[in-house]
Image (cartoon, helix red, strand yellow):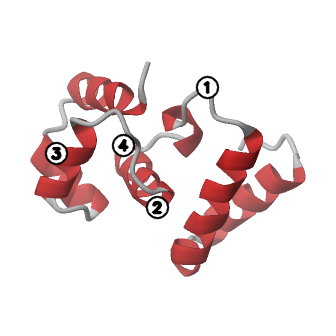
């Protein structure tokens, strides 16, 4: 299942409209519409905002076919752009993920 199909399914299951997701994620509704109707996934910081708004793990929205290296690059970019906006809990989860610790990440 592609990332946008996963998002659409979660929205449907949780009764969240595109407008509500736009407001919760801080992404303009027109941009969100483009992302949801394209198979190409947006920048990782956008994916993170969508995942946070839907209260799911970001990794769920990543394609199984992605390599570790490309996932690392996406994560590194997201941290560089949004790192100062992460809560202490999110920072700890990220550190645990990077270090390979199995602590409910």
Residue 33 drawn above or below residue 3: below
Q: Residue at x 65, y 71 (%)?
A: 88
The disc, 3 or 4, on the residue closer to the chain's N-terminal end is 3
- Give the left or right position of residue 24, taking residue 18 as reference: right
Give the crowd class for mark 3: few <14, some 14-19, many >=20 residues within 10 Å. Answer: some
Residue 25 placement (x, y as % from top left):
30, 58
Secondary structure category for the residue under label 2? helix
Residue 56 placement (x, y as % from top left):
47, 40
The disc, 2 or 4, on the residue closer to the chain's N-terminal end is 2
How far apart are the alpha carbons under marks 4 and 1?
A: 20 Å
How far apart are the alpha carbons under marks 2 and 4?
A: 14 Å
Q: Are marks 4 and 1 in contact (CB under 8 Å)?
A: no
Q: Which residue is under mark 2?
A: 45
Instruction: Say which of marks 3 and 4 sits in front.
Output: 3
Q: Which residue is under mark 3?
A: 33
Give the crowd class for mark 1: few <14, some 14-19, many >=20 residues within 10 Å. Answer: few
Q: Quadrant of the C terminus?
A: top right
How far apart are the alpha carbons under marks 3 and 4?
A: 16 Å
Residue 93 drawn above or below residue 51: below
- Give the left or right position of residue 97, taking residue 62 as reference: right
The disc, 1 or 3, on the residue closer to the chain's N-terminal end is 3
Instruction: Say which of marks 2 and 4 sits in front.
Output: 2
Task: Give the numbered dot on residue 54.
Answer: 4
Secondary structure category for the residue under label 3? helix
Give the crowd class for mark 4: few <14, some 14-19, many >=20 residues within 10 Å. Answer: some
The disc, 2 or 1, on the residue closer to the chain's N-terminal end is 2
- Give the left or right position of residue 38, taking residue 96 as reference: left
Residue 81 placement (x, y as % from top left):
52, 75
Q: Quadrant of the N terminus?
A: top left
Task: Give the numbered dot on residue 64.
Answer: 1
């Amino acid at each position: 299942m592609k990332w946008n199909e996963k998002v659409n399914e979660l929205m449907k299951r949780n009764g969240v409209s595109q407008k509500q997701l736009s407001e919760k994620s801080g992404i303009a509704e027109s941009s969100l519409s483009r992302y949801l109707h394209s198979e190409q996934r947006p920048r990782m910081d956008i994916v993170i905002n969508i995942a946070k708004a839907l209260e799911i793990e970001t990794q769920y929205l990543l394609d199984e076919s992605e390599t570790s290296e490309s996932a690392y690059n996406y994560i590194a970019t997201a941290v560089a752009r949004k790192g100062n906006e992460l809560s202490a809990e999110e920072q700890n989860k990220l550190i645990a993920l990077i270090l390979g610790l199995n602590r409910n990440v």
